């Protein structure tokens, strides 16, 4: 039985078999005895994207992984980094330090901050991402066509990634090619937080699931 720990681009958490390329967390949000989620969906504003393997460390997924014997942070899983970014997460400074520094440096550049702090990034993302109460931003045709690679948008309950001037329909197992940008683009809304969108425009290159190339 799959555990409820797979994150979609809307930031919602599901129980599906496919895990994806990255893990991450929003703090402690599970009961280790039942391995089920608590009612809260975050316990910290630092929503991270982490690697699934790091220096041979092993964890019991949604178990008791804290040194004290408590729950420890709740392992969440993303199809790829593009999905995690759309959901409002950012690269982890512990296990993905180089990528996190790249993200933070570009964030500082677009925001005019010489030495950006993690608190600065997390505060902005927490106010913007849909899963923590951010505003739903509608897109017109020109705004949709101007989005950078790595941005994600929604139409109804479907999510689409932008790459190479094309739209790719997202699923838990990968991407599939979609029709070009439609004329009636006002039905689309932005998933990727505005801050992350600015970082992507500044040149940050997220990791994609290999299905995007097929």
Image: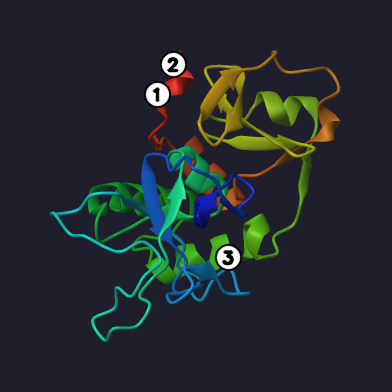
Q: Position of residue 102 (x, y in %)?
A: 32, 47
Residue at image point 41% right, 35% down: 203
Alpha carbon separation for disc pair 2 and 1: 6 Å
**Is there CB contact under 8 Å for labels 2 and 1?**
yes
Residue 12 position by quadrant: bottom right
The crowd level at tag 3 (other Cα within 10 Å; few <14, some 14-19, many 20+) is many
Name the residue rendered at 58%, 26% in the picture.
162
Graded by Cα atoms within 10 Å as few (under 14), some (14 to 19) or many (20 or more), the crowding at tag 1 reads few
Choose mark 2 or mark 3, whichever is in front: 2
For the residue pair 113 and 18, the one nearer the viewer reads as 18
Q: Residue furthest bottom?
A: 68
Q: Mark 2: few, some, or many residues within 10 Å (few <14, many ≥20)? A: few
| Mark 2 lies on residue | 213
Residue identifier under label 3: 126
Q: Which mark is residue 168?
A: none
Give the mark nearest the N terminus, 1 or 3: 3
Q: Which picture quadrant has residue 57?
A: bottom left
Q: Which residue is mark 1?
A: 210
Relative height, residue 85 to residue 58 (above, below): above
Mark 2 vs 3, N-terminal side: 3
Q: Is residue 61 left or right of residue 58?
A: right
Please, what secondary structure does the residue beneath circle 1 have?
Answer: helix
166 or 157: nearer the viewer: 157
């Amino acid at each position: 039985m799959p555990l409820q720990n797979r994150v979609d681009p809307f930031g919602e958490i599901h129980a599906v078999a496919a895990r994806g390329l990255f893990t991450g967390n929003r703090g402690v949000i599970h009961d280790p005895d039942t391995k089920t989620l608590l009612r809260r969906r975050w316990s910290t504003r630092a929503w991270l994207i982490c690697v699934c393997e790091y220096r041979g460390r092993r964890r019991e997924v949604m178990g008791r992984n804290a040194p004290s014997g408590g729950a420890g942070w709740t392992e969440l899983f993303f199809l790829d980094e593009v999905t995690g970014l759309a959901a409002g997460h950012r690269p982890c400074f512990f296990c993905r330090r180089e990528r996190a520094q790249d993200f933070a440096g570009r964030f500082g550049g677009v925001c005019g901050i010489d030495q950006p702090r993690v608190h600065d990034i997390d505060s902005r993302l927490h106010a913007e991402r849909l899963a923590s109460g951010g505003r739903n931003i509608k897109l017109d045709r020109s705004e949709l066509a101007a989005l950078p690679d790595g941005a994600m948008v929604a139409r109804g309950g479907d999510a689409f990634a932008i790459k190479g001037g094309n739209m790719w329909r997202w699923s838990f197992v990968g991407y599939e090619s979609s029709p070009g940008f439609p004329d009636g683009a006002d039905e689309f809304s932005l998933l990727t937080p505005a801050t992350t969108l600015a970082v992507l425009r500044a040149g940050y290159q997220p990791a994609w699931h290999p299905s995007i190339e097929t």
